[in-house]
Image (tube, rainbow, N blue to C red):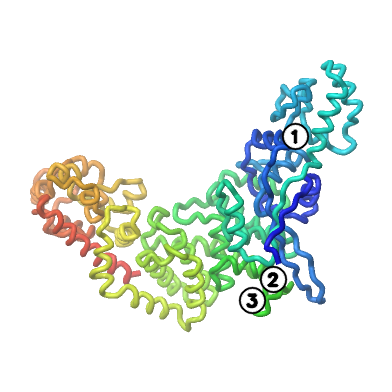
Amino acid sequence: MASFEINSIKISTLLGYVADNTIAIPEIQRPFVWDSSKVRDLIDSLYKGYPVGYIITWKNPDVKLKDGTTSQGKHILIDGQQRVTALSASLLGNEVLNSEYKKKRIKIAFNVSTETFAVATPATEKSNEWINDISEFLKPGNTDSYDYTTKYSKLTGMQPKVIMSRINRLESILGTEIGRIELSAEIDIDTVTEIFVRINSQGVELSQADFALSKISVNNDYEGNDIRKTIDYFSHFLQNPQDFNTIKHLDTNFVKKEIFNKIEWTHKFNDDLYKPSYKDVLRVAFTYKFKRGKLQDLVSLLSGRDFETREYKQEIVEYSFKALYDGVKDFINETNYKRFIMIVKSAGIINEDLVRSQNVINFGYVLYLLMKEKNYNPNVIETCVRQWVVYSILTQRYSSSPESMFDFDVRKLNECGSIVNYIKMQAEAELSDAFWDKILPDRFNTSVTSSNYWKIFVACLIKSGSRAFLSQHLTVRDLIEQRGDVHHIFPKDYLIKSGIEVQQRYNQIANYTYLQQEINISISNKAPSEYFKILNKQVSGGRVIYGGITNKKDLIDNLNENAIPLDVENMTYRNYDEFLRKRRELMAKKVKKYFYSL
């Protein structure tokens, strides 16, 4: 059986299919991203007979009902959503949502004399040469072509025959055919994706989450549209709270539903750690509730697939939509969400800049929801979530093939007798003495501040309440929250002038520290041995120059807090490599102590 068919469809038929939901546009509730001039260009191309590309539809499988009959699957519009929305806006007069979630009309005007199209303006509305809104003009029975031709001829002096020809050509747009690629229900997501990528010349990303959301959006039997809106609005409000009132007044039917009340809190919640996209919400809810990690499985389950018999059954569709909705509700629950963020922050991970991979946080939330579902003690949940998140960062667990790793982890965590013991076993296996003593110090041998290892070291400093380098009271957390800068322990200018000119050497993360700007300016380009002479006088009762530390013990404590070797006070550029080696070891020891304190 062919995996797809190529045919053509009249625009009027296509728009009719969209209207009766035979072909569903899954993104219909999301903003229309084309500007009005692009809509105008599309209509102009159709009028001139230019090709406007294909649309791609994917047929839902026929589902076996409980009475033994089958329900014929709908078609989902996979590619061409913006074009179809543009056509329905310009030719049918339907409103679209703009980027601010406000409804608007896109009126396209047509000048019969010049055969040009334009976005309607007050000028086109006042001019007798323009049909100001072609959607009104094209409505059946709305315009008598003969009467219009007669009036237009009198106004412009054009020949009626020419006017009628152009009016007929305008009306024929609805009868124009565009190409359609129909993808079979039998092909899998990977094949659908491959077809999409090869055909789509613009290289638009199409993820399995998009496919899953398409399936959700077009289901009218099991609250599919409510699930889709809940996911979409929840993630949107967290990232764009200013749009809350607009959407509240726009989508009045959804606002009346109980589920809207459950996401209303989001527009008043401001946090820099976890602002999940709609894909993140879907992935976490699915992984947690279905104990699977591959979204292609969700698409199959929402279609009713029985993995053993390979049939499509209505009861599986029903169960899958209910389970997914339950998972989404647990995700958006205000108590769950805020408590999870609190747990992660209690590990020193206070904002998104300290996590390189969003999937680390995503799976951390999966673990939290899973352990809560299994009725673990809240204190135990806190410890396990903190340790798993940090463990995942240190081992870069979700940096490659995250779906496969999600799938593996959630199955193991669900099936193991004790999640606590499983996490302990994983940590012992991968975070061995060799990791702490050799591997982690080697991983600190980098100049990249986006490194997972630098980020986790900073989180470690925050968790332990470490003060900024040479500060008496200000902490690393204080500086990060005030967007403080990272500076060099061995000043960059000093190292360059001393012959250490390679950027990857002087910018080593083992040479980085959080330092108050005024202290950094005072140190300037002095060698550590030079500015520590001044510091030693300062802690012996001399004039305070660097920060507010005024006793030797406090200075030593400050160095220990920042994992800086104490003999730095005697070091020059000649000792730089020795310093880096010693500090990497101290950093690794501090992170080890931090991990086991979680």
Residue 156 position (above or below residue 461): above
Q: Which residue is mark 1?
A: 47
Q: Residue at x 43, y 59 (%)?
A: 357
Along the polypeptide, which appears first: circle 3 or circle 1?
Answer: 1
Q: Looking at the picture, how far across and down is residue 332, in whole percent?
A: 57, 61
Nearer-the-camera pick, 282 or 299: 299
Type of residue at label 2? Gly
Task: Give how far apart the Cα atoms at labels 3 and 1 are.
Answer: 49 Å
Q: Looking at the picture, how far across and down is residue 538, in whole percent?
A: 11, 48
Say few, some or many: other residues with alpha carbon within 10 Å of mark 2 (under 14 / 14 to 19 / 20 or more).
Answer: many
Type of residue at label 1? Tyr
* Secondary structure under the numbered disc 3 in the rendered image: loop
Question: Quick check: marks 2 and 1 in contact, CB under 8 Å?
Answer: no
Q: Which residue is mark 3?
A: 307
Residue 215 position (above or below residue 158): below
Q: Which residue is mark 2?
A: 304
Residue 225 seen from this side: no
Say few, some or many: other residues with alpha carbon within 10 Å of mark 1 (under 14 / 14 to 19 / 20 or more).
Answer: many
Q: To which quarter of the image does residue 141 belong?
A: top right
Nearer-the-camera pick, 68 or 51: 51
Along the polypeptide, which appears first: circle 2 or circle 1?
Answer: 1
